[in-house]
Amino acid sequence: MPLLVAGLAIPTAIGVLSFIAARTDMSIYVLSVSSMLGLALAIDYSLFIVSRFREELAAGRVVGEAVERSIATAGKAIVFSGLAVAIGLSGLLWFRSEEHT
Protein backbone atom coordinates (compact mmCIF):
# COMPACT_ATOMS: atom_id res chain seq x y z
CA MET A 1 0.00 0.00 0.00
CA PRO A 2 2.65 2.62 0.89
CA LEU A 3 4.67 1.90 -2.23
CA LEU A 4 1.53 2.02 -4.37
CA VAL A 5 0.63 5.43 -2.97
CA ALA A 6 4.20 6.64 -3.54
CA GLY A 7 4.10 5.21 -7.06
CA LEU A 8 1.04 7.34 -7.76
CA ALA A 9 2.20 10.46 -5.92
CA ILE A 10 5.48 10.92 -7.76
CA PRO A 11 4.12 10.80 -11.34
CA THR A 12 1.27 13.09 -10.28
CA ALA A 13 3.75 15.58 -8.81
CA ILE A 14 5.90 15.44 -11.93
CA GLY A 15 2.82 16.03 -14.09
CA VAL A 16 1.79 19.06 -12.04
CA LEU A 17 5.36 20.38 -12.12
CA SER A 18 5.57 20.03 -15.89
CA PHE A 19 2.33 22.00 -16.20
CA ILE A 20 3.70 24.75 -13.95
CA ALA A 21 7.16 24.71 -15.55
CA ALA A 22 5.63 25.37 -18.97
CA ARG A 23 4.40 28.71 -17.64
CA THR A 24 7.18 29.86 -15.32
CA ASP A 25 10.88 29.42 -14.60
CA MET A 26 11.77 26.87 -11.95
CA SER A 27 14.93 25.89 -10.14
CA ILE A 28 16.72 22.74 -11.23
CA TYR A 29 16.21 21.36 -7.73
CA VAL A 30 12.41 21.40 -7.87
CA LEU A 31 12.12 17.96 -9.45
CA SER A 32 14.47 16.35 -6.94
CA VAL A 33 12.86 17.96 -3.93
CA SER A 34 9.32 17.21 -5.06
CA SER A 35 10.17 13.57 -5.78
CA MET A 36 11.88 13.23 -2.41
CA LEU A 37 8.99 14.82 -0.53
CA GLY A 38 6.39 12.90 -2.51
CA LEU A 39 8.04 9.58 -1.78
CA ALA A 40 8.68 10.32 1.89
CA LEU A 41 5.26 11.76 2.66
CA ALA A 42 3.35 9.13 0.70
CA ILE A 43 5.11 6.27 2.48
CA ASP A 44 4.88 7.95 5.88
CA TYR A 45 1.19 8.79 5.64
CA SER A 46 0.30 5.40 4.16
CA LEU A 47 2.10 3.58 6.96
CA PHE A 48 0.30 5.76 9.48
CA ILE A 49 -3.11 4.74 8.10
CA VAL A 50 -2.15 1.07 7.75
CA SER A 51 -0.80 0.83 11.30
CA ARG A 52 -3.92 2.55 12.68
CA PHE A 53 -6.11 0.15 10.67
CA ARG A 54 -4.24 -2.86 12.08
CA GLU A 55 -4.67 -1.51 15.62
CA GLU A 56 -8.40 -1.26 15.06
CA LEU A 57 -8.56 -4.82 13.71
CA ALA A 58 -6.55 -6.06 16.70
CA ALA A 59 -9.08 -4.36 18.98
CA GLY A 60 -11.75 -6.67 17.52
CA ARG A 61 -13.50 -4.34 15.12
CA VAL A 62 -14.84 -5.53 11.78
CA VAL A 63 -13.20 -4.20 8.63
CA GLY A 64 -15.80 -1.51 7.96
CA GLU A 65 -15.57 -0.10 11.48
CA ALA A 66 -11.77 -0.34 11.43
CA VAL A 67 -11.59 1.67 8.21
CA GLU A 68 -14.02 4.25 9.55
CA ARG A 69 -12.13 4.74 12.81
CA SER A 70 -8.73 4.74 11.09
CA ILE A 71 -9.72 7.49 8.71
CA ALA A 72 -11.51 9.42 11.45
CA THR A 73 -8.38 9.53 13.62
CA ALA A 74 -5.29 9.10 11.45
CA GLY A 75 -6.95 10.76 8.46
CA LYS A 76 -7.44 14.00 10.35
CA ALA A 77 -3.84 13.99 11.52
CA ILE A 78 -2.65 13.41 7.96
CA VAL A 79 -4.76 16.25 6.58
CA PHE A 80 -3.44 18.71 9.17
CA SER A 81 0.13 17.49 8.70
CA GLY A 82 -0.18 17.80 4.93
CA LEU A 83 -1.51 21.33 5.29
CA ALA A 84 1.37 22.20 7.61
CA VAL A 85 3.89 20.87 5.08
CA ALA A 86 2.19 22.78 2.25
CA ILE A 87 2.13 26.02 4.24
CA GLY A 88 5.75 25.59 5.26
CA LEU A 89 6.90 24.90 1.72
CA SER A 90 4.83 27.75 0.33
CA GLY A 91 7.16 30.08 2.21
CA LEU A 92 9.74 29.18 -0.41
CA LEU A 93 7.67 31.09 -2.96
CA TRP A 94 8.75 34.36 -1.35
CA PHE A 95 12.47 33.80 -1.93
CA ARG A 96 14.06 34.64 -5.23
CA SER A 97 16.84 32.40 -6.45
CA GLU A 98 19.92 34.31 -7.59
CA GLU A 99 21.47 32.48 -10.50
CA HIS A 100 25.14 33.12 -11.08
CA THR A 101 26.49 32.87 -14.61
Image (cartoon, rainbow, N blue to C red):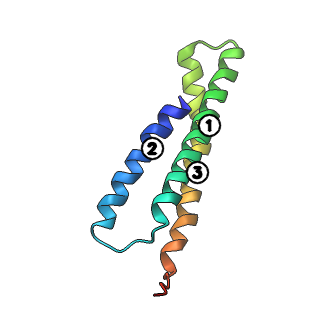
Q: Which one is earlier in the sequence, the residue at label 1 or at label 3?
A: 1
Which residue appears farthest toward the front when viewing the image?
Answer: 101
Whole-percent x, y for residue 98 in the image: 50, 85
Classify 80 as above or below 5.
below
Q: Residue 80 versus residue 31: which sits nearer the camera?
A: 31
Alpha carbon distance from label 1 to label 3: 10 Å
Q: What mark, if any, has residue 96 been given in the picture?
A: none
Number of residues whose C-alpha sits closer than 10 Å to that of mark 1, classed few (under 14), some (14–19) or many (20 or more): some
Query: Is residue 30 rendered to the left or right of residue 44?
Result: left
Q: Residue 17 at x, y = what percent?
A: 37, 59
Front residue of 84/22: it is 22
Q: Is residue 99 left or right of residue 19?
A: right
Identify the residue position indicated by label 3 in the image. Answer: 80
C-alpha span from label 3 to label 2: 18 Å
Write down the residue under mark 1. 74
Lower position in the chain sequence, tag 2 or tag 1? 2
Q: Distance between the Cα atoms at labels 2 and 1?
A: 19 Å
Amino acid at the residue labelled 2: Ala
Q: Name the residue beneath numbered marker 2.
A: 9
Tag 1: residue type? Ala
Residue under the image location 59 percent in, 46 percent down: 40
Q: Secondary structure beneath disc 2?
A: helix
* Residue 51 vertical placement versus 24 (above, below): above
Q: Secondary structure at mark 3?
A: helix
Q: Are marks 2 and 1 in contact (CB under 8 Å)?
A: no
Q: Residues within 10 Å of mark 2 (few under 14, many from 20)?
A: many
> Which of the two discs, 3 and 2, sits closer to the camera?
2
Q: Position of residue 7 (x, y in %)?
A: 46, 38
Name the kind of residue labelled 3 in the image: Phe
